Image (cartoon, helix red, strand yellow):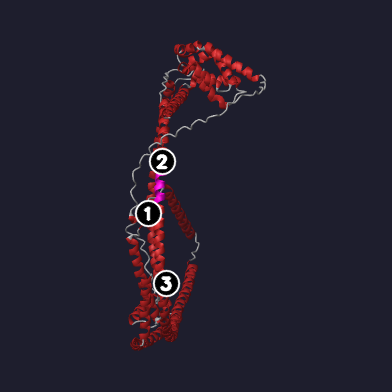
Amino acid sequence: MGSADKTDHNMDAQHKKFILDVVSGCTEHKKLLDVVVNVFYGQNGRWLSRGDRSQFVIICYLITFVLDDIGLQRFSNIVKSQDIKKMHTFLNFFFTHLTTWIQEEWNNIYDAACVEEQWIGPLLRWRPNIDILMDQLALKMSCGNQVKKIPIKTTKPQEFCLTKPKPRPLPMPELIPQQEKCKPVPNSTYRAPKEMQIIKEIKQENHQKTKELLNEANMTQFRCGNPQKSERTRRVMFQIQKDLDSKLQFNSFQPSEPPSSNKTKNCPVKLNGAAILRQRALRNRKEEEELQRVERLTEGEGEDSSFVQWQKNMREMDLHEELAKIEQRRLEGRISHKEAAIARINIMESNQKASQLKKEETAQLMREYAEKRLQEEKELRDLVQQVAEGHKNSKMAKEKLHKFKQSIVREVSEQSQALLRQALEEAQAELSRKFQTILEIRAIESLPHIRVKYFDDTETAGHELLGEMSIVELKLRLAHLKEVEQTEQQKKREHILEVTHKKKELLLEEVELNNLHMRAMAQAAAIRKEKERKASVDLQQKVAQDKRVLAMQKKLEEKKQEQRRLEQIKSSKAKTAEKTTEQAGTRDKKTMTAEEICESMVKNLEQLIQRAF
């Protein structure tokens, strides 16, 4: 059995090597084989399928290159294993045209002497044997076309089975390779980590703290409802209110001075050509308007100074009325703000009384709640004892189940590791085989194909056109055209520089004229603004002396005095309330024994629950 396996293995290796050699040879001599197969399909392609092309390529390669190596017997076996009609047609076509156009086409690809010596000569020596093979194929084709007669069945004698042969003995089993022992699973895998225990303890501590805080908040949950504010809080509130009132004082009209027009540090602004020309057009238009006005005056036309003066007076009167109304509305707003503050103080007093009643009711409810909790504590203690006994029984069952699961996990992990190791070895062997075949194919494809082609750039292409020229002549003409184009561009550049220089000089002159005009206009604007400032100051003084404004200011002062009086009363009441609360606190400390007992009982109950769980 061992020798038979080795022979089969050797045969498989020989077959693989033969197949790889055939595939690499077909790819290497693809041009020679395509010449024959393409013409064969051109003549007989109507009744042949494209899927059989690879068969004809391989048969052509075997005849031409490998026939001396494999021999006629193996070649005939390969041919007879395929379709007889197709093989007979191809062999007849190949040897019929071998010395005519097939040889000519091969001479165009390779050297004629090499083609004659390496391929045509051996094929002609094999021609008689191939003719015999073709006759055999033709005979099979003719026999296949005749109608076969059905053979007559005859009786065949059968021997008696007197003795039975002994069964063949079973072969000796092969030794199973011993695998290395795997490391045992560490005990820490099935043991809970210390960090989980630490986190659990921290959670319990935090839970205990939250319960204590909750009990404390339940005991003193309505202390935040104390409406009385401390002395420091009242001082801060009074200071904030005072700051807000100071911001709302608009009695003194002190407008900020307008920015000076004659700035010493002006940021330089670079104007473009369009902006300079626009300034020149504006300056020319203003000069024309001034000249027209002077001409009208010289001709005797009067000015409209009286109308302008009347219009100015009317505008001042309207502005005075408008400012007085604005000041009146502002004072009305401040008066309404003070009235709202007084109303808030009254509402706070009523809220304080309601909160005092609510505190008394909550104290009574807390006492009732403490008594109820004492009763519930006894019931919970009994329930905790029952739950603790049940937990002890459940822990034993959990431990047994955990051990059973650990044993199952060990068995499954050992089996899975063996299967994975076997699959990995098979995959590695398959990958190495594929990698080797890929390397062989790439080595075949990387063979160099040397082609040398000489090129003369002084000759024309030979298309017989009128404007045909060589590459050298084309380069010379392009260089000449480039020089002409550069000279034209240089002339244009010089012309553009000259025009821009003239334009720049003209713009500089315009800038100087515009600066002179702007300085004159700035001086006139400064004088006009000074007159307007004096007029606005006079108007503000008139508004401050208005009777309606003075009456509103007097009313505002009265409201402020009333608010101060109410705040003083409120502060005195707060002091007395603080004293009474301190006295009540000392009394509550004496009567809080029931609540303290309830709180201590709740803590003891929580500790019992934690120990049980």
The residue where tag 1 is placed is 516
Foreground mark, 1 or 3, reads 3
Tags 1 and 2 touching, CB below 8 Å:
no
- In the image, 483 versus 5, the foreground residue is 5
Residue 326 position, x and y percent, is: 46, 75
Depth check: give the residue in front, 197 or 367: 197
The reply to whether the C-beta atoms of the residues labelled 3 and 2 are less than 8 Å apart is no
Query: Which contiguous range is marked in magenta?
Result: 410-423
Q: CA distance from mark 1 to mark 3?
A: 104 Å
x 41%, y 35%: residue:
172
Residue 141 higher or lower than 200, as above or below:
above
Q: Secondary structure at mark 2?
A: helix
Reading the image, the residue beneath label 2 is 422
Where is residue 549 drawn, in percent x and y? 44, 80
Q: Which residue is under mark 3?
A: 387
Looking at the rendered structure, the secondary structure element under dot 1 is helix
- Look at the image and tell me whether residue 535 can be seen: no
